[in-house]
Image: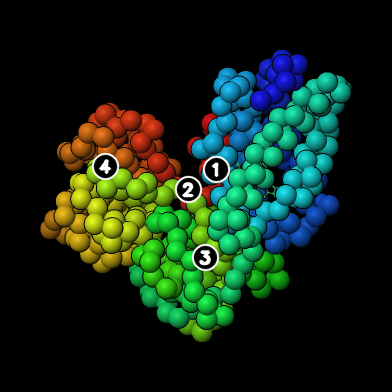
Amino acid sequence: MLTEQSAATVRATLPAVGAAIGEITERFYARLFDAHPDLLRNLFNRGNQAAGTQRQALAGSIAAFATHLLDHPDQRPDAMLGRIAHKHASLGVAPEQYDIVHEHLFAAIVEVLGEAVTPEVAAAWDEVYWLMANALIAIEKRLYEEGGGPGFRAFRVEERVEETADVVTFRLRPADGGPVAAFRAGQYVSVGVTLPDGARQIRQYSLSGAPGEAVRQISVKRVQGEATPDGEVSNHLHAHVHPGDLLELSEPFGDLTLSDAPDTPLLLASAGIGVTPMVAMLADLAAGGHRAPVTVVHGDRSPADHALRTDHTAYAGKLPDASVHFFYEQGAEPGTRTGLVDLTDIAVQPGTRAYLCGPLPFMRAIRTQLIEKGVAPADIHYEVFGPDLWLAQG
Ligand SMILES: Cc1cc2nc3c(=O)[nH]c(=O)nc-3n(C[C@H](O)[C@H](O)[C@H](O)COP(=O)(O)OP(=O)(O)OC[C@H]3O[C@@H](n4cnc5c(N)ncnc54)[C@H](O)[C@@H]3O)c2cc1C
Ligand code: HEM
């Protein structure tokens, strides 16, 4: 909780800081990467940096955190902090790195806001920063303790399956022959690869196999740029990684996981490569004997583009009360529908808990329809395959 004096100062300066936060974070990253070029090459996603998306996520989360402290001084925004901490833990972020971020962030604030940053203003925002940083450090410590620590482990590609023209599945076993820890359906791993220019870039991939398997399975869509460059890591994995090759994987992290509620009706809605966590969830529900209704909804360009379609259908088929609705923009087959996903004539049971994964416009549309059908906003959970700009919007 902020001290009373800092709360008053943060309240008075939030509009000015909020208005300048885009510029502050731009200056912050410029300073950070100037002083530590290795962080841009080997930790941060340089595609997101070039596109500016991660900047918006960091800036937005600090403003959202400050607003939350003022509006709800007795509560911690655990959902937001948890999401960031899981991402950080998958990347191996360490407590001492918060001092580095602090140094460059505050230098950037002074650079942009100038004399408006009186000692009182600096102290109040310092308090906001460390409240957030210490909360993240504490959650990350717990995640490292529970999940086997930070860092990466070498896995050997055992199998590579061409799912569709754009999606490839890799099945991986630890190179040291040791066991893999169980994961919770919906979690992801970070994958680190060394690119031709020597940079080590890290991306997250949802685990798309069944949680109890002795192998790790990820399914990667190749990101093809149109006006922008092709995705670096996904294209590298497609072009250069084959059976026998090694890949560096983190332990599994991520907070979009199923809660243990065998009697809760569920709705799993995905689009495109957003299918990956849903397949793991269905595998888990099938293995656990989930009895309540499960509504499976998926949208894709065509049946041929629908990655993991066989598993998606087969795991749903093992559930006693599942209904499956596949929507294709083109080439719909009997039993599937033409067009974008639309819940209008799909029954949604009272008390449904929904899990969404796909592009933001898809998730916005589904969320709106679910709320119209009476699903409580708190029962709608989602995963974003990139910097979380919903989170940035608080
Ligand atoms: C929790 C989570 C789970 C995920 N699960 C999966 C999964 O199961 N399967 C999967 O395929 N993906 C998944 N992703 C997405 C994955 O992590 C990568 O983001 C994706 O593979 C793209 O990475 P890339 O290196 O190929 O693209 P990047 O090189 O990171 O490029 C990303 C985008 O930035 C654009 N860009 C690059 N440079 C510039 C520039 N100079 N100006 C403007 N734009 C630019 C690119 O054109 C591209 O559109 C997941 C992401 C998260 C966060
Ligand atoms: C209080 C301080 C911090 C805040 C508020 C913060 C906030 C965030 C947010 C909101 C995200 C995006 C999460 C998502 O999209 O799901 C993120 C990602 C990330 N953070 Fe932090 N962070 C902080 C400290 C740090 C530190 C100390 C490091 C390490 C140097 C770090 C490295 C990263 C990296 C590498 C990513 C992923 C970037 C990407 O994929 O482009 N962060 N952080």
Rendered image: mark on residue 234: 3
Residue at point 76%, 60% (across, down):
38
Q: Nearer the viewer, mark 4 or mark 3?
A: 4
Three-letter amino acid code at the position of disc 1: Gly
Label pair 2/1, CB-CB below 8 angstroms: yes
Three-letter amino acid code at the position of disc 2: Asp
Q: CA distance from mark 2 to mark 3?
A: 23 Å
Can residue 248 be seen by looking at this rendering? yes
Name the side, left or right, on which 359 lies relative to 82: left
Q: Residues within 10 Å of mark 2 (few under 14, many from 20)?
A: many
* Residue under pointer 2: 255
Rendered image: mark on residue 82: 1
Q: Residue furthest left?
A: 334
Decide: is 8 above or below 128: above
Residue 209 or residue 167, whichever sits in front: 209
Q: CA distance from mark 4 to mark 2?
A: 19 Å
Three-letter amino acid code at the position of disc 3: Ser
Q: CA distance from mark 1 to mark 3?
A: 26 Å
